[in-house]
Amino acid sequence: MRLLFTIVLVMLLDWYAFQAVRTLAQGWPTAMRAMAYAFHWLVPIALAAWMIASATEATDGINKNILTVVRTLFFIIYISKILVVSVLFIDDLRRVALVAYNHFSGSGSYDAGRSRFLAQMSLFLGGIPFVSLLYGMIRNPYRYTVFKETVRVKNLPKALEGLRIVQISDIHSGSFLLKEPVENAIKIINEQKPDLAFFTGDLVNSVATEVEPFIDIFSGIRAKHGVFSVLGNHDYGDYHQWESPEHKEQNLENLKNAHSRMGWDLLLNENRMVEINGEKVAVLGVENYSAHPRFPKYGDLQKAYEGSEEAPLKLLLSHDPTHWTDQVTKDYSDISLTFSGHTHGMQFGVEIPGWIKWSPIKYVYKQWAGLYQDGHQYLYVNRGLGYLGYPGRVGILPEVTVVELRPA
């Protein structure tokens, strides 16, 4: 019944959107008009067939990448149609108001027909997300962009001036449709010649096996003083149905082992004292900690902090940026710089350096992309290397961060 209800809703949406097509096609040659009508109705029929096939498990043998592309295309089409329908609804309100006005005013003749202009406008507006989301899926998933920041650290030892840190985050390896383009990200990372490399969580979507095809790629990251990593909310397998708690626990162990196989030093509420040019740098890493109640709090910053007190420079890896304002700036004022990810910049927004930086995610996360400062403490939120859900990006490109430390 739920499937039938969904199909009926889709058909009603398409019937309403069809009004714009029919209005626009008035006066077209018969053959051209028939082609436009057929193309319009082909999409909902194909979607209904797809939903039935999925419900009956007829799609189980199809390649995962094909399934992702098909689902995304339907998503893009219907996001666009919702905009079309919204404009048509405005036009219908106009027509109802016109009929009511003329009825009560006793006016004579009037034209309550559908506005051809608004029909054209609806299709134009619907075309904007269609083109944008399609372009974002085709062009941007592997369009890695280097974001560089100079951070001025209070009381930074002279020996640590110019320290270069590369950060990546949110790989979500189970979402990648292609393997070869990911190799370019490693090339970009190594070209930065980092002293330290940080990964701030979400290596997979849910299951440790997702990273297996990419072990050889990510093991190629090179940093002079080591590659350090932490877990993100997706890494614990909380979004997967497991046969038993033991299976879930084993999955997490397999994921931790994957970090080790890649040569990454996974920090589980602990720290590493790294000696650089004769000075101690404390690299702290917590498990996932979020101020939002819908995400788990596995992190223990007090435990990770222990033993790092005397280090002149403390750097924290914490997947969720809400941790920074919830604990770090309140209770650990000597942690100079925190590295986070998690938000992806919603994979959608507008960024023009020096002009505008906007994404809908800003209404959920106060710190959602780039560098933030509170007194002498800093937070950097990485936009993510991979993607989740929608296999693309619009306006918010996948990021490799380069942070260079200088004295304040």
Image: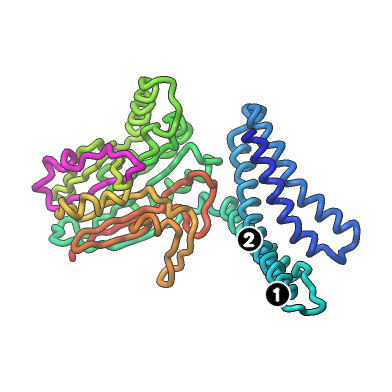
Q: Nearer the viewer, residue 137 or 213?
A: 137
What residue do we see at 86% from left, 58% from top? 32
Q: Is residue 237 magenta?
A: no
Q: Is residue 96 above or below residue 108?
A: above
2 and 1 marks in contact (CB < 8 Å): no
Is residue 197 visible from the viewing direction of this image? no
State the image coordinates of residue 255 (x, y, percent, origin top left).
37, 30
Q: Amino acid at mark 2?
A: Ser
Q: Is residue 328 above or below residue 87?
A: above
Q: What residue did someone put label 2 on?
A: 86
Q: Is residue 44 above or below residue 374?
A: above
What residue do we see at 48% from left, 37% from top? 174
Q: Secondary structure at mark 2?
A: helix
In the image, taking residue 1 as reference, residue 179 lies left or right, namely left
Tell me the quarter of the picture where residue 229 sits: top left
Neighbour class for label 2 at 10 Å: few (<14), some, many (≥20)? some
Q: What residue did someone put label 1 on?
A: 101
In the image, taking residue 196 as reference, residue 106 lies left or right, namely right
Point out which mark residue 181 bears.
none
Q: Secondary structure at mark 1?
A: helix
Query: Which mark's residue is nearer the viewer, 2 or 1?
Result: 1
Q: Is residue 251 above or below residue 233?
A: above
State the image coordinates of residue 69 (x, y, percent, origin top left).
61, 43
What residue do we see at 63% from left, 55% from top? 82
Whichever of callouts 2 and 1 sits on the residue coming sooner in the sequence is 2
Quote the CA–CA distance across marks 2 and 1.
23 Å
Per the rendered image, the range of residues in magenta is: 293-319
